[in-house]
Image: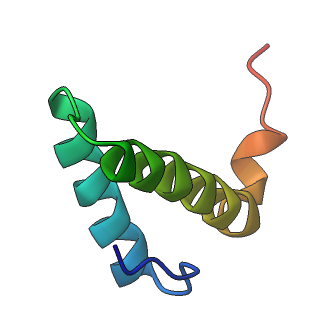
């Protein structure tokens, strides 16, 4: 598992694809569970930094 901070949209998409792979099945190993948790945290941080406008959007 070689995980680093997500800095580009390309890295973001790669991380989302990997999350989908891990999420789609029953991960069998502790390293895979840890990888999924780490990727979810990194994607959340990236989204907070790059999609701020959506957080403040309210539907009337």
Relative to 19, 47 lies left or right: right
Instruction: Name the residue rendered at 27%, 42% in the picture.
Output: 29
Relative to 49, 9 lies left or right: left
Front in this rendered view, residue 13 or 31: 31
Residue 12 in picture, x, y percent from top left: 42, 70
Instruction: Name the residue rendered at 74%, 19% in the picture.
Output: 59
Residue farthest to the front? 30
Give the number of marks: 0
Q: Relative to residue 50, is residue 3 depicted above or below?
A: below
Instruction: Name the residue rendered at 19%, 26% in the picture.
Output: 26
Front in this rendered view, residue 30 or 36: 30
Instruction: Name the residue rendered at 31%, 49% in the picture.
Output: 32
Residue 30 in picture, x, y percent from top left: 37, 43
Residue 24 in picture, x, y percent from top left: 17, 31
Colour pattern of the rendering? rainbow
Relative to 19, 9 lies left or right: right
Q: Relative to residue 20, is residue 8 depicted above or below?
A: below
The quarter of the displayed image where residue 25 is located:
top left
Relative to 56, 44 lies left or right: left
Residue farthest to the top? 60
Front in this rendered view, residue 28 or 3: 28
**Quadrant position of the C terminus in the picture:** top right
Residue 1 in picture, x, y percent from top left: 34, 73
């Amino acid at each position: 598992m070689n995980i680093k901070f997500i800095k580009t949209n390309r890295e973001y998409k790669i991380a989302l694809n990997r999350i989908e792979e891990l999420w789609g099945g029953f991960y069998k190993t502790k390293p895979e569970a840890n990888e999924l948790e780490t990727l979810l945290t990194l994607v959340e941080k990236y989204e907070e930094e790059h999609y701020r406008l959506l957080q403040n959007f309210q539907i009337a």
